[in-house]
Image (cartoon, helix red, strand yellow):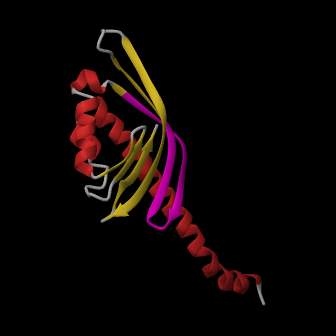
Amino acid sequence: MTFHLIIALLLPMFLPIGTAIAQSDKDDAAIRAALQAQAVAWNNADLDGFMSYYLRSDKLKFVGKNGVQYGWQPLYERYQKNYPGKEGMGKLQFDIIENERLASDVFQTIGKWQLVRTAKDGSEEILGGYFTLTWRKVKGKWLIIADHTS
């Protein structure tokens, strides 16, 4: 066999690997862009924009210090209550530690969050912690289906 024939026979076996890697990079970038867009929306006191990256469903899960909460609407109302207005929302920043594909339509993101805002006494308040997000691709858009934030 000639070298060119061997390459021609072997090349199709490796093309799917390259395509899968390219798709993974594209999805990783899309999720990172979604988190950046969420931070921008939050920092503009646009709660609707921030929440647009969560699955709008009763199946959405949020896990925090008070346990598990289900549903998009209760999460929206929780954010409204705990972070009222632009001052209450402050400035949010995300730092992604890891973004890993778990299935063709599922990613898990682990990261840190920091929020700087004005406290009730007028001083600067710095809050922060870690998060784990589970994303699912729904109708071509990556959406958070589970959020564990501490």
Magenta region includes residue 126: no
Of residue 4 and residue 137, the one placed in the foreground of this image is 137
Occupied quadrant, residue 3: bottom right
Residue drawn at x 29%, y 14% is 120
Tell me which residue sits at (69%, 80%) in the image: 7
Q: Nearer the viewer, residue 22 or 106?
A: 106
Can you say whether 145 is above or below 76 in the image? below
Task: Using residue 2 as the reference point, say whether residue 20 is left or right of it.
Answer: left
Residue 92 at what x, y percent from top left?
38, 30
Seen at 58% across and 68% down, the residue is 18
User: What secondary structure is the stretch in magenta mostly built from?
Assistant: strand
Q: In this view, does 77 lie to the left or right of 54?
A: left
Q: Nearer the viewer, residue 56 or 2?
A: 56
Q: Does the magenta stretch include residue 108?
A: yes
For residue 54, above or below residue 103: above
| Outermost residue, right side | 1
Q: What stretch is highlighted in magenta?
A: 92-112
Q: Where is residue 100 in the image (x, y as percent from the top left)?
A: 54, 55
Is residue 25 among the parts visible in the rendering?
yes
Give the percent coordinates (x, y) of residue 75. Answer: 28, 44
Q: Nearer the viewer, residue 111 or 65?
A: 65
Q: In this view, does 61 lie to the left or right of 132?
A: left
Say which quadrant the N terminus sits in: bottom right
Residue pictured at 35% horizontal, 36% vertical: 39
Residue 108 % position (x, y): 49, 54
Q: Residue furthest top?
A: 122
Q: Can residue 44 be seen at all in this image of the molecule?
A: no
Farthest-out residue, front: 66
